[in-house]
Amino acid sequence: MLRLLNIEFHKLKYSKASKVLIIMYFVLLSSIALIAAIKFDIGPIKFHLAEMGIFNFPYIWHFNTFVSSLFKFFLLLVIVSMMANEYSNKTLKQNLIDGLSKKEFILSKFYTVIALALFSTIFVFIVSLILGLIFSDYNEPSIIFSDLEFLLAFFVKLLGFFSFGLFLGILIKRSAFAVGAMLVWAMLEGLTKLILYWKLRPNVDDIMQFLPLEAMGNLINQPGSRLSAVKAVAEQVGEDLSYDYAVHWYEVAIVLAWTALFIFLSYRLLKKRDL
């Protein structure tokens, strides 16, 4: 495993585009801390996000993983460009000539996907822990380390998303077209959802939860309506914001099943393809 990872990190090390994208991604993850600086007054109304409780434990785990997952497209570009470079630079063929099997080649890419998802999760954990210790009103260990399942959901979400990108990169061979295919798939899922709402409104979510991007999105639901300030406003206007924010085991299982399928299809595709 370490040998295969070393091969991939060596390739990333000498790819300027990948290094720039990875740095931008982690800079954006760090920028979550800047939210704490957003503060302005409009007459008697004082707006300070940090004081609204977004960095309170355990809510911060939900909020930060949700926001951080919005930046995942930067690493998607790294994944698909990584595969595109294998074809354009003919390193894939050279690796196979040098004795790397096709199975080992796919595993090296999958290990890289796991590493990027894991590094992202650890980084979000560290940033969230620091922000929480600074701004949270609750510092009891039992509260700090509750709701950590959102970090697991974040890791699984990235793992599934990057595996999908890896499969598209192998299938299409061109990074721009692979990203385009991902966007087209997202639009197709959105269109499918609209059609199902029109035809089968009560059962839409039961069907949509099995589609890959929808399944990944279901892992971390929007955290906005969970804020006490938002709930207070909703109660004043008579709105019911009851929502299921929990990370469910079957949602994790669906995404892991898609991840396994994407890696298997990537291997089968590479095995059958004449290089």
Image: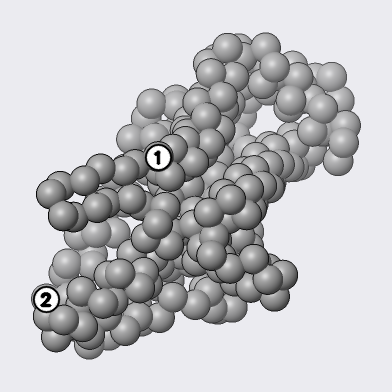
Q: Are marks 1 and 2 in contact (CB under 8 Å)?
A: no
State which mark lies toward you, 1 or 2. Answer: 1
Q: Quadrant of the C terminus?
A: top right
- Estimate the x, y position of residue 130 in percent, counting from the top left: 63, 48
Residue 231, given in percent of the width and then of the height, sits at 28, 76
Residue 251 vs residue 129, the one in the foreground: 129
Say which amino acid is labelled 1. Answer: Ala
Q: In this view, which residue lies farthest toward the front? A: 44
Image position of 76 (left or right of 4)? left
Alpha carbon distance from label 1 to label 2: 43 Å
How crowded is the residue under tag 2: few (<14 C-alpha within 10 Å), some, or many (20+)? few
Up-down relation of residue 118 to residue 19 (above or below): below
Residue at 67% from the left image edge and 21% from the top image edge: 12
Is residue 225 found left or right of 81 in the rendered image?
left
Colouring scheme, one of rainbow, by chain, secondary structure, one colour: one colour
Task: Please name the residue shown 53% across and 18% down the image.
Answer: 20
Residue that label 1 marks: 37
Q: Is residue 153 visible?
A: no
Mark 1 closeness class: few <14, some 14–19, many ≥20 residues within 10 Å: few
Secondary structure under badge 2?
helix
| Disc ID at residue 200 | none
Does residue 180 appear in the picture of this structure? Answer: yes
Q: Residue at x 44, y 38 (%)?
A: 34
Left or right side of 8 for 117: left
Secondary structure at badge 1 equals helix
* Residue at the disc numbered 2: 198
Q: Decide: is 184 above or below 51.
A: above
N-terminal of the pair, mark 1 or mark 2, is: 1
- Judge from the rendering whether residue 203 lies leftward or rightward of residue 273; answer left or right: left
- Residue 112, by quadrant, is top right
Query: Looking at the rendering, in which quadrant would you find the N terminus?
Result: top right
Q: Residue at x 70, y 17 (%)?
A: 13
